[in-house]
Amino acid sequence: LQFSPASLPSPGDCGPPPKLNNAVPNEKLLGESFPHMKSVTYKCLDGFYNIYGKLDVVTCLSDSQWTPIEEFCERSCVDPPRSRFARINPKDIKTYYPAESKVSFTCRPGYNTIPEVGSTVTCFTNYTWTALPVFCEGKPCGDPGKPENGDTVILTNLLYLAKVNFICEEGCKYNRNCHPCLFPYISEITCFSPPNVAKASINGSSTGNFVYNSTVTYQCDDGFSLIGEASLRCTTEDNVNGVWRGSLPECKVPESCLMTLTNTEVCLCKCVCGLLRISGCIVHCKITEQICTSSVVSLNYSKPSVSVVK
């Protein structure tokens, strides 16, 4: 077996550094030959740690040999399990957890320790954790009470972070920002100002907030008739916001009207939509699809004549 001079290390140089199962050189190495006193530092693979602080570096000696090194990277469990009711004891917080490691927990604020229940977990030899026992229970909050104009529904219990439902009577609502085990604020539902209707006014005040179940009544101006229901009622659809219930009425000119003739001339009159303008004649007006027609009757002493104006 022959080697070319280029493939052989020079006197005092070393070949490639030792290979380890769970570690690799910390830097990229170029070439196959390393000079005397060259040092190579290793780093553990992901999931492995230098748990016992063993030597992690080798050095090229004058006899072209690397200093001895042994496997120093050991496997570790991942971080211990987390819990909403407990946290890791500060003294047991570490960067790695070898097999058979134990970690203890303490109850978080708002919880009491359950007697005679364990509070530790262990890293198995297969590098998984044992289950964390339920060793804490929430502190009691007491009776939440019954809100005025409502009722209380207890879903589970009355311990810390438990939730209860407050059911409000129709016409009442509660503050959605209440905290667990705190009494909600109950207030009455109100409606904003009712909508306006052309040629109409509202009996009483038409602005401001109107309490639940109150009503407003519309009244048409003189010369107009109300079509539909005259009143709206303040109610609610979601038990939170007030809305006006009922169909909005309209105020229109009457379909027929009668006035007394004051002269004997032929009289032509015009019926204007929304306003009835009459001067000295008998007029019968009909409003159909926003087109006004008027039948005008002229009272001559002889035979009457009829003219129609559109």
Image (cartoon, rainbow, N blue to C red):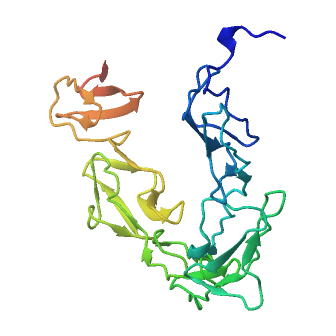
Residue 248, relative to residue 131: is it above or below?
above
Q: 4 or 199: which is nearer to us?
A: 4
In percent of the image, x 69 and y 56: which residue is there? 78
Q: Position of residue 34 (x, y in %)?
A: 59, 26
Figure quadrant of the N terminus: top right
Residue 4 visible somewhere in the drawing: yes
155 left or right of 200 in image: right
Is residue 176 toward the left or the right of residue 286 in the image?
A: right
**Looking at the picture, does residue 259 appear above or below residue 187?**
above
Total number of numbered discs in the rendering? 0
Q: Residue at x 20, y 34 (%)?
A: 277
Q: Residue at x 62, y 75 (%)?
A: 163
Q: Does the image show residue 165? A: no
Position of residue 88 measured from the top left corner of the image (x, y, whole percent): 62, 72
Q: Locate the C terminus by quadrant.
A: top left
Please report the residue visible at 65 percent of the width from the left and 65 percent of the height from the top. Answer: 82
Picture quadrant where residue 191 is located: bottom left
Judged left or right of residue 293, residue 121 is right
Q: Looking at the picture, tell me which residue is in the foreground, 44 or 147.
A: 44
Q: Position of residue 58 (x, y in %)?
A: 62, 41
Q: Position of residue 153 (x, y in %)?
A: 65, 79
Q: Quadrant of residue 298?
A: top left
Q: Reply above or below: 21 against 306.
A: below
